[in-house]
Amino acid sequence: MRNVCVSFLILIIILGIIPSASAEVVAFIKNPRPPIVIVGNPYPKFFTIQPNNSYTVYLYGIDDVGIAKIGIYYRVNRGEWKWLYATRATINENESIYNEITSKFLTQDFNFTTFYGKVTLPPQPAGTLVEFKAVVEDEEGHIVESPIGLYFVANPNGKKILIVDPSLKFWAMIENLKDLELMVNLSSERYDYNMSDYEKLIPLLKPFVNHSSFLNFHNWQYLAEDYNIAIIPPEELSSALADFKPDVIILSNLWMSEWGISKESMGKLLKYLRENNAGLIVTHGTLYDGMVLDDKPIYLGPTAHIGGFEAYENGSIATALGLELLPFIEEVKLRAIEFGKSYLAETPSILPFIPSTAKLGIKNKEIIKSASLLEFADGTRAAFGWEYLLPPKSLKFAKDRIRNLKSEVKDDIKEFTDLQGELFGYSNYFRSISALDFTLVDKIVDSEILDDKIVVPVGFETLNLAATQDVIERVRLLKAINRDIINIAALSPDYIGAIITRDQKHRGDGFRSAYISFEIEAGENKEFEVLKDLIEWASQFKPIQTFAPIVQAVVLANDIDWKIKGENLKEHLENLGATVVRVKPEEFEKYKDSKLIIILGGPKAYDGVGDYVKQALSLEEQERVIKEEQGIFIKRDVWAEKQIVIILAGKDRNQTGEKVGRYISGVNEKYINLLAEFFVS
């Protein structure tokens, strides 16, 4: 009898060690399987918590026999992993998480062990990265780990920085992808549990296992020490702008089409920037516009971030950054499909992930103050396609260097296209590598803006782009001034790495922006010091104070051309906020240094107007006026530096009037804003 009592007591002790089940435990299981573990809150809201606050992780283990061990490994700032045992959590302690987890059971009639527990991670100071993973071991010795959970400890007193970065969750799930895939399979095969959210992501995650260098971890902890950061996926942008009210928004390497910002959210972003004078920083592949044609366009990148001609009306990420001619080239690509030139459509305007070991030289030390040179010990990856903004002489050097670079980077570009093939089922290596021949950059440089259309050379043929007159005039103006309204604040000698800034100080609702062609957020402290410089600059927008309109036009015209359409031109420009002074030919010498000069008439215009037209136009351009091939021109620096000279010319007075009328129809408030920005840049 005593032996029976002792045996019974031992059994009670053993049963007391095993975590109690919320369902009946079957004594004998045929072919027992590994457990699964669910973390209810792997990331706090915005991926951040405040300093000196603990963070309680709730987890749920499921096994078909019994759970021997369950808890959390965590580490701080990439230090050693530390173990904490889970303690049992009551159902009503965090009822919303419990209900979220248990609602995914497909049946309530199950025969396995479950454990709902918690682990409290200790408080940390601002600027800390905390990573953790739940681990469960069953009685058969199977061990399974959850995907990585993580958060940053942010500085609540710093400026608010909203970061759109979906890559963190991808990176976190890939770290333990083998276990995640096992659990997804077990959830349906064994445990009647719905893990379809993870299941849908696995095809997007698996290709990165063999191409991990295209999914670098972003070290936002370096910003969190000084700033109140919030990290979100693209689909939360609209709500986060309203809730978080950031000072600066960072779009972090959003190169996949799945990571694109919707047109609705983009509109809200652009509106927020203007209404709040907030800063915008965009990195690396966010402007990638990869496309493959298979009966219809297959978009590999978030092409809407650039947009076509509609971006000149609605705005886009590219236009906000000052890369204003990218929508023009995007439109060329779309029209090339109709023209039967698919190779143009499939050539990316912006190609990311080009390896570079070149040092980044800081050119604007008023913006970037922390360094004069940025070195990348292990190299970096940068994007190509912005180079059309270089001055003509620098562009020539860039062409030579980048074309010579092709042989060195072809394997990396091949790996990038291989990754796309695995992700999307489509890729085009040859079109990607051909981008480095300046295929599309040359289309920007060599295009001709005629009176009523845009002509783009395509081999021995030409592609004629019809567009509204306001688009034609905007592109004509941008070809003359785009490189002046931006500032290349940093540049590498291989012409791949760059930081391009824009300051819309000409308008009260302007904002500052920066495009960083490389993945600065994958760097260490020195890269983040540069990023902090950009944040400080972008967050301190100051419009210039003027007592007179910025755009002041001098119109040179004889009496007849002035009467035909000159007065209409004056009225139209003044209605848009410009000032206009009409000057007769005999008065013009003292106005030749004016920043904006508009000349009415062609090379044969009387009273001396024609003589000034001949100074402004080349012989070939004069001949085009006489032959009625073109009558609207924009010339730079004819009589003074940083000068715009617009010639509206016909072969006779009536045709000149027609050209003036056409020009008027294309000049709107956005056009005047670009002129103003040019004059104050």
Image (cartoon, grey):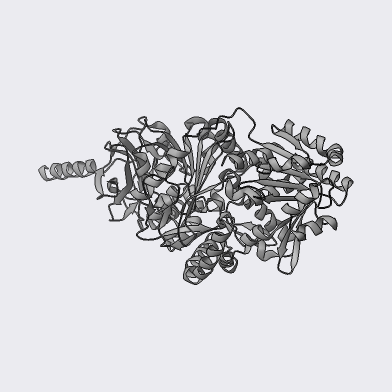
Above or below residue 480? Residue 670 is: above
Q: Nearer the viewer, residue 371 or 137?
A: 371
- Locate residue 569 relative to residue 40 in the image: left or right: right
Q: Is residue 213 visible?
A: yes
Q: How many numbered tags mark residues here?
A: 0
Q: Nearer the viewer, residue 416 or 355?
A: 355
Q: Is residue 219 visible?
A: no
Q: How far across and how far down the image is residue 415, in percent?
A: 49, 66
At x 50%, y 56%, the residue is 204
Q: Residue furthest top?
A: 547
At x 36%, y 39%, the residue is 224
Q: Residue furthest left?
A: 2
- Locate residue 508 relative to residue 313 in the image: left or right: left
- Locate residue 531 relative to residue 560 in the image: left or right: left
Q: Nearer the viewer, residue 665 or 364?
A: 364
The quadrant in which the N terminus is found is top left
Q: Nearer the viewer, residue 236 or 204?
A: 236
Q: How far across and how far down the image is residue 91, in percent?
A: 36, 32
The quadrant in which the C terminus is found is top right
Q: How far across and how far down the image is residue 389, in percent?
A: 57, 54
Q: How far across and how far down the image is residue 252, in percent?
A: 48, 47
Above or below residue 96? Residue 624 is: below
- Locate residue 533 relative to residue 626 in the image: left or right: left
